Image: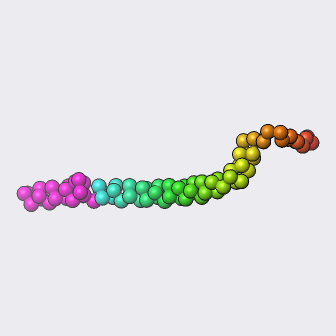
């Protein structure tokens, strides 16, 4: 009976304890999720770095400001085409 109790305690510690198989599986899942998130963030950082390099050129920055924000220089006149409906 004592041996069965010891085997039960050993099983409990190995499988469900703090350093058991169940906890190891949860940690492996967390590692997988964090690795995927790290790759996503790394891609975003690369894209933002490329965008920053492009916008560091004044000509590119001016083009983006004009297109995205609709800015014009003083003295410029904007002509818009009417769209047929």
The image quadrant that residue 34 belongs to is bottom left
Q: Is residue 13 magenta?
A: yes
Residue drawn at the location 75% of the way across and 47% of the way down: 67
Residue at the far left: name it. Answer: 2
Q: Residue at x 11, y 56 (%)?
A: 5
Q: Residue at x 23, y 53 (%)?
A: 18
Residue 26 spot, x, y in % from top left = 34, 55
> Residue 80 location in percent, x, y?
87, 42
The single residue placed furthest to the right in the displayed view is: 84
Foreground residue among 55 and 27: 55
Q: Which residues are magenta?
A: 1-21
Task: Choose between 40 and 58: the one closer to the eye.
Answer: 58
Residue 71, quarter of picture = top right
Q: Residue at x 91, y 41 (%)?
A: 82
Q: How is the image coloured?
A: rainbow
Could you tell me if residue 83 is visible in this image?
A: no
């Amino acid at each position: 009976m004592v041996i069965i109790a010891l085997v039960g305690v050993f099983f409990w510690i190995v499988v469900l304890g703090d350093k058991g198989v169940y906890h190891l599986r949860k940690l492996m899942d967390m590692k997988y999720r964090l690795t995927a998130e790290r790759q996503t963030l790394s891609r975003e950082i690369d894209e933002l770095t490329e965008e920053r390099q492009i916008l560091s050129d004044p000509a590119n920055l001016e083009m983006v400001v004009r297109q995205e924000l609709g800015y014009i220089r003083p003295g410029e006149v904007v002509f818009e085409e009417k769209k047929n409906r």
